[in-house]
Image (cartoon, helix red, strand yellow):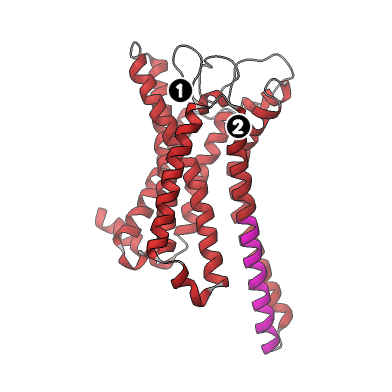
């Protein structure tokens, strides 16, 4: 969303190095090679955002309703749903305001639009940072539950979980405010890219280690029952498939956006990099898709949560 004058938004500045691009996700026309530009219709973007909003609201409602789900693990999942909810709400709100601007409905209210623009920027950036943090927190929680099973409840206590959650939210708000204020500094983009790489490495190391432990445990059981090959292969394939889906979706949905940020640092004026910049709106759409998929991976696989979700839906009728 842009107003008169140069773009001052972090997200708005990422898809163009020139002033005032006409629409979020569409870079200014550049001379050079022909580029494949995959546009996302506004209706599809808004539809995906609304699906994500509904889905994540249901996750939050189910966890809040069932006291059996009031544990650190589900609190992390709930906070992930809130982060995804903020990403979706802010993106839908921004698109709606853009459409109103293009229709002339908000013409002559530049000061109000600029203030709303700043608020949405902080929401979007903060929600993205917190979403990545809670994905990492869930990975750490699962790691501790496997490798320190007997001490899990003494290590991951509710007070510690609340302190971690509070720290993540405070850090997300502060970092997003700084990122918006200093969006035109290369250090901001490098920090965001480094943060994504760190989360990706953390999740990959933890989940691969958990898979290795599960396979080792399966081999031990197989030796006891003298059925080493079938048991080990079956668990190994299932675990590898789950790990591939989990990390693959994370990289597919978040990777293009952070590739965009990396290229803004490495080759902001190169024509080939400009082809990537023109698909910025597609990259944001993939992040919305991640907000839709996350509940399916982390929340709806729980039988207790699914049962509570059915109760929530029945009560709503």
The tally of labels here is 2
Q: Which numbered disc flags the more N-terminal residue, 1 or 2?
A: 1
Looking at the image, residue 54 sits to the left or right of residue 25; the answer is left
Q: Which quadrant is the N terminus positioned in? A: top left
159 displayed left or right of 147: left
Q: Which mark is residue 1?
A: 1
**Neighbour tally class for label 1: few under 14, some 14-19, many 20 plus, Cα within 10 Å:** many
Per the model, the C-alpha gap separating discs 1 and 2 is: 23 Å
Q: Give residue 303's quadrant in the image.
A: bottom left
- Given residues 85 and 210, the one toward you in this image is 210
Q: Is residue 289 left or right of residue 277?
A: left
Residue 247 place in picture, x, y as percent? 62, 53
**Is residue 255 shown to the viewer in this render?**
yes
Q: Which residues are magenta?
A: 203-225
Helix, strand or loop at disc 2?
A: helix
Q: Residues within 10 Å of mark 2 (few under 14, many from 20)?
A: few
Q: Which residue is mark 2?
A: 187
Q: Residue visible at 28% across and 58% down?
A: 314
Q: Identify the disc placed on residue 171.
A: none
Q: Is residue 275 magenta?
A: no
Q: Residue at x 52, y 75 (%)?
A: 149
Q: Is residue 48 visible?
A: no
């Amino acid at each position: 969303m842009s107003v008169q004058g140069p773009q001052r938004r972090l997200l708005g500045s990422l898809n163009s190095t020139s002033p005032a691009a006409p629409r979020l996700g569409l870079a200014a026309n550049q001379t050079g090679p022909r580029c494949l530009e995959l546009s996302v219709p506004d209706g599809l973007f808004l539809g995906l955002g609304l699906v994500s909003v509904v889905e994540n609201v249901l996750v939050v409602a189910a966890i809040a309703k069932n006291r059996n789900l009031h544990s650190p693990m589900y609190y992390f999942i709930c906070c992930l749903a809130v982060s995804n909810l903020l990403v979706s709400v802010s993106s839908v709100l921004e698109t709606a305001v853009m459409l109103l601007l293009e229709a002339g409905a908000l013409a002559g209210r530049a000061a109000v639009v600029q203030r709303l623009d700043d608020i949405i920027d902080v929401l979007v950036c903060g929600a993205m940072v917190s979403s990545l943090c809670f994905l990492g927190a869930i990975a750490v929680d699962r790691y501790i539950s496997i490798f320190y099973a007997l001490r899990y409840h003494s290590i991951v206590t509710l007070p510690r979980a609340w302190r971690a959650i509070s720290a993540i939210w405070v850090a997300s708000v502060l970092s997003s405010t700084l990122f918006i204020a200093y969006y035109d500094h290369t250090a901001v983009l490098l920090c965001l890219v480094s943060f994504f790489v760190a989360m990706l490495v953390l999740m990959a190391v933890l989940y691969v280690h958990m898979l290795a432990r599960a396979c080792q445990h399966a081999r031990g059981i197989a030796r006891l029952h003298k059925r080493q090959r079938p048991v080990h292969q079956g668990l190994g394939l299932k675990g590898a498939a789950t790990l591939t889906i989990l990390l693959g979706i994370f990289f597919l949905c978040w990777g293009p956006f952070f590739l965009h940020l990396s290229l803004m640092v490495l080759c902001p004026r190169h024509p080939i990099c400009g082809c990537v910049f023109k698909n910025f709106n597609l990259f944001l759409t993939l992040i919305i898709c991640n907000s839709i998929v996350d509940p399916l991976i982390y929340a709806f696989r729980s039988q207790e949560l699914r049962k509570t979700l059915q109760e929530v839906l029945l009560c709503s009728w």
